[in-house]
Amino acid sequence: MPTNILQKYLQKMIRLRIDRAHGVAPNKPVLLLAIVELIEQGQISENKVTPSPDLFEIFMKYWSIITDRRPNLALPFFHLKSDGFWHLHANAGYETALKVTTQIKTVSRLREIVASASFDDELFLLLTNNHDREVIRQTLIDTHFADFKVGIESLITEGQQIDAYRQALLRQVKHTFLSLQPLAPAEGENPIRIAGFRQTIMRIYDYTCAVCQLYVLTLDGESVTEAAHIIPFKVSGNNDVRNGISLCQLHHWSFDRGLISVDRNYKVIVSYLMLERGPAEWLLTTLRGKSILLPEHDELYPAQEALAWHREEVFRE
Ligand SMILES: [Zn+2]
C-alpha cells in the first residue's frame, strides 16, 4: 500500500470529528481501538463490522479506563459516518429511514436500522496489514489518549495474551480430551486464562444459556451467561472448551449444585431431590428432557467424559 494512502488515513484519524460540546467524549477513537483489536484477533476478517457483543465488550474495556461516564456504542457507530471513511448499511426495509436519520441514541434503535458498517476498502486493507494497523492504532492513542497511554497499552498487551490463550484452547480440540489436567497451584488463578476460557465459551455459545437459551446483554457489555466448567476447575485444572458450557446464572448455580445435568444425548436431566415453586416457565422441572443448545461445530461439543463425570459426581439422583 503506498505510503500516501496510509498518510491520508492517519490524518483522518488525527482529525476525527469529536463532539466536545459536553466535555471530551472520545467515543469514536474508542470504537476504532475496539475494531482494530477484533481485526487483529481475526474476529473481523471481512470489511463488515456489526454491533456485536464482542465489540461491546472490547469497547467497554477501553471506555472504562478513560471515563466513568455511561458508555453508548450507538453514538460512535452511527456518527463515525461523518468522517467520510465509515459507511452504514441498513437492514432490509430501513434504507429510507437510515438516509433521513440524523441521530441514533440507543443501541436498540441502532440494531433496528443498521445491519452493519464498512470502511473504505483501501482503509480496510491497511487495517488488515499488521504494520499499517499498528501505525494507525498508535496514532489513535497518541492523538486522543495521550493521558491514558500506559493503561491502554497494557490493555492491548493483555488482550493479545488472552487471544493467544483462546487460540490455543481452540487448537486443543484437535487432540484427545483429557478430563483431568492437574496444574501447579500457581497456575490456578491466572487471570489471562480465566478471561480466555470465558471469552472462548461466550463466543462459541454466542452469549446464550445452553440450557434455557436466555440471552441478556447490558449496554455495558455484561452478559447474564457465564462460562461454566463441567468438571470444576479446582478438580480438573481443565480449561479445554469441551469441559465448558455457557449457562445463565440460575442454571450455572443449579448445575454446580447437581440439581440439573446433561445426559449422553445432550438432553437436560433434573434431580427429583429438591423442592421448587414459582412460575412454571422458570421451574427447573420444566427443563427435563429438553435438548441443550450445542455449538455449531461438533468438535466443540461438551465432552461425554466430562458430562459423565458430572452425572456421577455432582448430579443428585
Ligand atoms: Zn439458563
Image (cartoon, grey):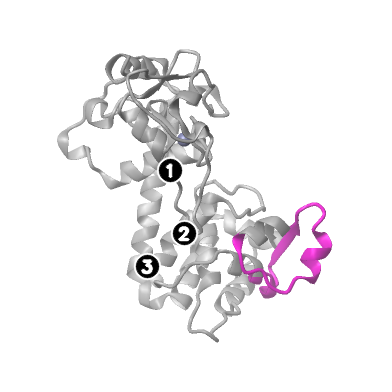
Q: In this view, does 206 lie above or below 233?
A: below
Q: Name the residue under label 1.
A: 199
Q: In this view, does 150 lie above or below 42?
A: below
The image quadrant where one finds the N terminus is bottom right
Percent coordinates x, y for residue 309 in the rendering: 32, 16
Q: Which of marks 1 and 2 is nearer the N terminus?
A: 1
Looking at the image, residue 285 lies above or below residue 31 = above
- Does residue 62 belong to the magenta stretch? no
User: Split into 4 quadrants, where in the image is the C terminus?
Assistant: top left
Q: What element carries label 3?
A: helix
- Mark 3, residue position: 65
Amino acid, disc 1: Gln
**Residue at 50% across / 42% down in the picture?**
207
Residue type at numbered disc 2: Asp
> Residue tagged by mark 2?
220
**Going from the N terminus, do you reach mark 3 or mark 2 first?**
3
* Residue at figure coordinates x 36%, y 56% from the top left: 157
- Can you tell which quarter of the image residue 110 is in? bottom right
Q: Distance between the residues labelled 3 and 2?
A: 13 Å
Q: Looking at the image, tell me whether mark 3 or mark 1 is earlier in sequence order.
A: 3
Q: In which quarter of the image is residue 167?
A: top left
The residue depicted at 58 percent of the width and 29 percent of the height is 296
For badge 3, the amino acid type reads: Ile
Q: Would you say 93 lies left or right of 120 here?
A: right
Front one among 97 and 243: 97
Can you say whether 67 is above or below 181 in the image?
Answer: below
10 Å neighbourhood of mark 3: few (<14), some, or many (≥20)?
Answer: few
Look at the numbered disc 2 and give the secondary structure of its residue: loop
Is residue 4 something that shows in the picture?
Answer: no
Magenta-tinted stretch: 79-107
